[in-house]
Amino acid sequence: MTPSLSARQKLIGHRKIWQRKPVLRRLYREYYRRIEDHLPSGATHVVELGGGSGNLKTHLPAVISTDLVACDWLDAVLDAQAIPFADGRIDAFVAVDVLHHLEHPLRFFREAVRCLRPGGRILLVDPYISPMSFIIFKLLHPEPVDLSVDFFTDSEDTELFGRDPWDANQATATVLFGRQRDAFERQFPHLRILTRETFNWVWPLTGGFSYPALVPEHWADWLCRIDRWELANRLSAFHVFIVVEKIR
C-alpha cells in the first residue's frame, strides 16, 4: 500500500480537529480504556498500527505508534501488511479505525500471527454496520460500505481498493467477524476470538473528524454513560471492539 502525497496533510488535519474537539477526545478515551483493559498481562511491546494523529499515545505513552507516513508525533513508518518485526516478539498490536483501510486484511492477520508471541493479542476498533449506522455511513460518510465482499475468495494479487491508504470498506470488520467468522477461524487456527462487542451508538453526535460536534463539551461524560446501553448498541452501534489472541 503506497501513501498518497496528501496522506501526511490529512493526518495533520485530523490532529488539529482532535485538539479542538473535546467531545471527540472524551469518546475516544472510552476506546482506549477498552484497549488498556484487554492488553495481555505484562505487555511491554505494544505496537499501534495506523497511529494517524497520535491520539493513543496520550493514553498509553509507552506504545510504539506507527503509520504509513512519517509525522513528528509517530515513532516509526510501517505497513500493517508487511510488518518488519522478528517472529514472536510482539505482545500486542492495536489498530483503531485501521482494519477497514487495509487492501488485504488477511495478509495483515498472517503478519500479526508471525510477529506475536503466544498469548499475544490483536486489539481492533473499527466501524460496525448496524441498521442505523448503515444509513448514516451511506448518506453522510465518504467511505464506501460493501457488505458483499468475500475476503476468502478475492485474490490478493488484486488491489481491492486501489493504492491510496485512505480508500476503505467500512464493512470489513462486520463481514470478517460476522458471516465470515467461521472462515476466519479455519484460516487462522492459531488465533482465538476473545471479544466482539458492538458499541458507540452516540458517535454521530460528536461529528467525528468530518463534521462539527452536535453536542457541547459538558455532555461528553453523559454520552459515554448512555453509550453502554446494550439494546441501543445492537440496533445502532457504529463501532465494534474485537480482541483476538494467539493461542500457540
Image: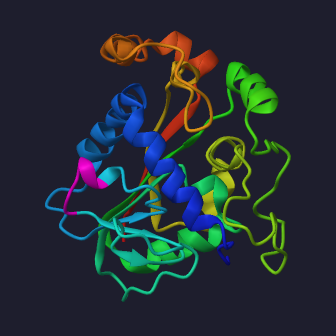
Regarding residue 69, the answer to whether it shows in the image is yes
How many numbered circles are shown? Answer: 0
Q: Residue at x 69, y 72 (%)?
A: 4
Q: Which residue occupies the foreground of this view, 39 or 126?
A: 126
Q: Residue at x 48, y 78 (%)?
A: 78
> Is residue 58 shown in magenta?
yes
Q: Position of residue 228 (x, y in %)?
A: 40, 17
Residues rendered magenta in the picture: 57-62
Q: Which residue occupies the foreground of this view, 60 or 155?
A: 60
Q: Which residue occupies the foreground of this view, 15 or 106?
A: 15
Left or right relative to 29: residue 166? right
> Is residue 228 shown in magenta?
no
Q: Which residue occupies the foreground of this view, 61 or 44?
A: 61
Regarding residue 242, the answer to whether it shows in the image is no
Q: Residue at x 67, y 73 (%)?
A: 5
- For this orientation, the residue located farthest to the left is 42
Q: Is residue 35 above or below residue 224?
A: below
Q: Is residue 130 above or below residue 240?
A: above
Q: Position of residue 220 (x, y in %)?
A: 35, 18
Q: Is residue 65 above or below residue 183?
A: below
The quadrant of the picture occupied by the C terminus is bottom left
Asked where in the image residue 150 lies, by quadrant, the reply is bottom right
Left or right relative to 247: residue 188? right
Q: Position of residue 73 (x, y in %)?
A: 34, 65
The quadrant of the picture occupied by the N terminus is bottom right
Which secondary structure is most common in the magenta stretch? loop
Q: Position of residue 165 (x, y in %)?
A: 67, 65
Q: Is residue 115 above or below residue 220?
A: below
- Check the image and tell me how it is coloured: rainbow
Q: Residue at x 68, y 32 (%)?
A: 129
Left or right relative to 149: residue 97? left
Asked where in the image residue 108 lies, by quadrant, the reply is bottom right
